[in-house]
């Protein structure tokens, strides 16, 4: 790996940017790319402008999860260690070097970088939505490449997400006389057992396998050891496949939760469309030799495809390293992804 690319990654890792504290990294990236046209949107940054050539958007989030005692960036045995190394400052380093490259600038595409904040926090606070609204010309892009950690795979589409609050209601009573009440927690037992037996359901789209999953992720009930609980509340999380709309997924989840007393959807995010036939993305696959895969999970590919921009996940980070206390990235993979994207954007 070229030393400057490793140096850029170390520089980014050493700028603290947990969710909600992205102002400094946004300002530092802006200063570094100061010779290029820019648009600041809150704590996010758009670098570059269209000139009439086909427009390719490179996108990456600047925030990390909270620190877990990590020190400054360090390199050992070909890996760079530090908070955000894989998720996703390796992708940001690749973006910066491509935007600085004069051969990319003079190539056949207008290449624009979108550095956005608050991806690791709640879905509704993700600033990519604000960026796409403020720089609405991005909706005319030919395609977008989101440099999330993919282990060097080209991962198409992404699952959608639903979170729903499900409640079972009973009647409080003294635990010595439970027949005077109705236990909301045990009332939910049969329903929980059925949900426990729900297996992931496979959907094959353009030869790629996506899985619909349903899981209880939080549960709360009871107020004291000697009171029969009058209410039991759980959060149900569904990940639905790209051939399913939000409305269809909500209807399916509502039916699965029909045994509950209350059902309330609290959060939704659409799935990302699968763009395996897009010419430029197909050429990336062919020229790089990178494996093709389905994205099992949600990424901001969904936000781009929602506004009509074909998009794909392709980045140098390693998914298994994301959010780890000893997070690291293979520098050879960073160099490989950079070289593959540079070849695509200059040919």
Image (cartoon, rainbow, N blue to C red):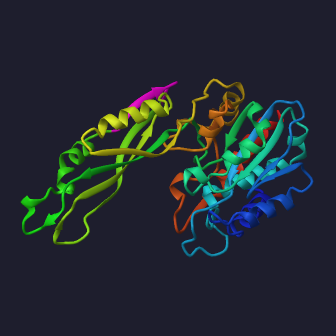
Q: Quadrant of the C terminus?
A: top right
**Against 229, is 97 above or below?**
above
Give the side of residue 105 with respect to residue 25, left or right.
Answer: right
Which residue is more in the foreground, 4 or 294?
294
Residue under the point 26% across and 57% down? 231
Q: Is residue 265 magenta?
A: no
Assign the magenta stretch its main secondary structure: strand
Measured from the top left, where is residue 323 in percent x and y? 53, 61
Measured from the top left, where is residue 28 in percent x and y? 80, 64
Measured from the top left, where is residue 34 in percent x and y? 89, 57
Q: How many marks?
A: 0
Residue under the point 7% across and 69% down? 176
Which residue is more in the foreground, 252 or 88?
252
Give the side of residue 224 with respect to residue 96, left or right.
Answer: left
Q: Quadrant of the N terminus?
A: bottom right
Give the side of residue 135 with respect to residue 289, left or right.
Answer: right
**Against 340, is 74 above or below?**
below
Measured from the top left, where is residue 135 in percent x and y? 78, 42
Bounds of the magenta segment: 200-208
Which residue is more in the foreground, 227 or 88?
227
Q: Could you tell me if residue 22 is visible in this image? A: yes
Which residue is more in the foreground, 209 or 160?
160
Give the side of residue 113 with respect to residue 158, left or right.
Answer: right
Q: Could you tell me if residue 58 is visible in this image? A: no
**Against 72, is 253 above or below?**
above
Residue under the point 26% across and 46% down? 196
């Amino acid at each position: 790996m070229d030393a400057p690319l490793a140096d850029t990654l170390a520089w980014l890792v050493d700028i603290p940017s947990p969710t909600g504290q992205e102002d400094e990294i946004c300002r530092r990236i802006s200063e570094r790319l100061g010779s290029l046209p820019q648009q600041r949107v809150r704590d996010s940054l758009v670098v570059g402008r269209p000139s009439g050539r086909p427009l390719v958007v490179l996108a990456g989030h600047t925030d990390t999860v909270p620190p877990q005692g990590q020190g400054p960036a360090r390199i050992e045995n070909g890996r760079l260690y530090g908070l955000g190394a894989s998720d996703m400052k390796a992708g940001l380093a690749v973006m910066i070097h491509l935007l600085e490259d004069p051969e990319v600038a003079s190539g056949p595409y207008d290449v624009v970088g979108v550095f956005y904040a608050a991806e690791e926090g709640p879905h509704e606070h993700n600033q990519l939505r604000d960026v796409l609204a403020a720089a609405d010309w991005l909706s005319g892009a030919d395609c977008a490449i989101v440099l999330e950690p993919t282990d060097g795979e080209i991962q198409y589409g992404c699952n959608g997400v639903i979170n729903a609050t499900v409640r079972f209601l009973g009647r409080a009573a003294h635990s010595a006389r439970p027949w005077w009440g109705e236990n909301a927690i045990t009332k939910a037992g049969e329903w929980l057992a059925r949900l426990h037996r729900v297996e992931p359901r496979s959907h094959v789209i353009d030869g790629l396998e996506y899985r619909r999953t349903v899981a209880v992720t939080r549960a709360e009930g009871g107020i004291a050891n000697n009171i029969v609980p009058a209410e039991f509340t759980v959060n149900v999380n569904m990940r639905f496949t790209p051939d399913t709309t939000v409305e269809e997924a909500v209807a399916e989840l509502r039916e699965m939760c029909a045994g509950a007393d209350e059902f309330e959807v609290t959060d939704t995010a659409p799935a990302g469309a699968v763009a395996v036939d897009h010419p430029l993305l197909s050429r990336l696959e062919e020229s790089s030799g990178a494996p093709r895969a389905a994205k099992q999970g949600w990424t901001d590919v969904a936000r781009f495809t929602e506004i009509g921009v074909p998009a794909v996940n392709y980045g140098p980070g390693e998914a298994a390293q994301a959010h780890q206390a000893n997070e690291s990235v293979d520098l050879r993979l960073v160099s490989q992804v950079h070289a593959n994207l540079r070849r695509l954007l200059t040919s």
